């Protein structure tokens, strides 16, 4: 219901309805006519039972229309928006959760069972700072890559759902699609490691044969997280998303 206060059009309808309610109550009280309006056209309109009845019926009609608008339009639309956002956020969380919890089978998890605790703006900002240091665990990066590769088509197919919410949501979802695509393009590009190099894999420095590959993944995941923060702020979810 907070949409009523955020949206300009919804606020206008609310103000009109409150004004109608106030006017209806004011008319029902039948306050005495102000002396200078007596024997005037305005005074006659305000005291005429016929005109007062028409005015009150008009106000009742406005209030009834607004009441049915809330029940039949606004509430169902808000529920649909909430359901649509949940689907979109589950898909987005599937990639980030594989990174956060280092999930080997994160790419196989069905969307209804994805943990969305990773959709937390504060946590994401911390991870963005950590990724800039280029010292992340290679498994975190690998599993996020695997899930992004698996979910790439899902992100593209969900664009229609984002469009149903608003053009702004669709535009931001297109950014997320682009970031997931750029991340997934690194799938299968991991360099081959010989026996002598295996002991260097867990050391994050230039001697690590996977260092450049990991840096690319860190950059792409960081980009995805940055757009995710913007997406969450747009959706007003932030750390309250569950």
Image (tube, rainbow, N blue to C red):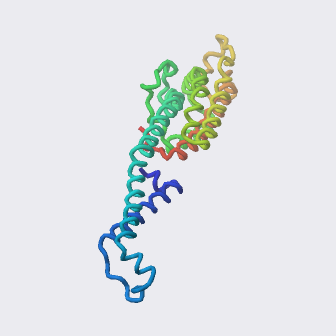
Asked which quadrant contains residue 114, the reply is top left
Q: Is residue 116 left or right of residue 125?
A: left
Q: Position of residue 132 (x, y in %)?
A: 63, 39
Q: Can you see residue 72?
A: yes
Q: Is residue 118 left or right of residue 24?
A: right
Relative to 241, is 43 above or below?
below
**Depth check: 102 or 106 in front?**
106
**Residue drawn 66% across the image and 32% down it:** 178
Specify the farthest residue to the bottom: 36
Q: How many numbered circles does the render carry?
A: 0
Specify the farthest residue to the top: 195
Q: Position of residue 107 (x, y in %)?
A: 52, 20
**Residue drawn 60% across the image and 18% down it:** 199
Relative to 164, is 43 above or below?
below
Relative to 67, is 127 above or below?
above
**Depth check: 64 or 18 in front?**
64
Q: Is residue 49 left or right of residue 238?
A: left
**Depth check: 38 or 183 in front?**
38
């Amino acid at each position: 219901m907070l949409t009523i206060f955020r949206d300009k059009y919804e606020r206008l309808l609310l103000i009109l309805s409150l004004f109608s309610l106030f006017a209806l109550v004011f008319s029902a009280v039948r306050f005495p006519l102000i002396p200078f309006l007596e024997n005037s056209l305005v005074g006659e309109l305000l005291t005429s039972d016929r005109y007062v009845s028409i005015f009150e019926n008009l106000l009742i009609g406005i209030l009834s229309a607004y009441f049915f608008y809330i029940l039949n339009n606004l509430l169902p639309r808000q529920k649909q928006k909430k359901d649509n956002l949940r689907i979109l956020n589950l898909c987005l969380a599937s990639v980030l959760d594989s990174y956060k919890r280092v999930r080997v089978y994160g790419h196989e998890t069905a969307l209804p069972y994805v943990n969305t605790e990773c959709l937390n703006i504060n946590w994401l900002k911390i991870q963005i700072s950590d990724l800039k240091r280029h010292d992340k665990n290679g498994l975190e990066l690998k599993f996020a890559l695997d899930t992004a590769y698996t979910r790439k088509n899902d992100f593209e197919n969900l664009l229609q759902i984002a469009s149903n919410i608003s053009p702004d949501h669709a535009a931001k979802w297109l950014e997320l699609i682009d970031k997931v695509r750029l991340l997934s393009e690194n799938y299968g590009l991991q360099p081959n490691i010989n026996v002598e190099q295996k002991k260097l894999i867990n050391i994050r420095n230039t001697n690590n044969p996977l260092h450049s590959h990991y840096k690319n993944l860190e950059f792409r995941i960081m980009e995805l997280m940055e757009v995710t923060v913007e997406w969450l702020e747009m959706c007003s979810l932030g750390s309250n998303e569950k």
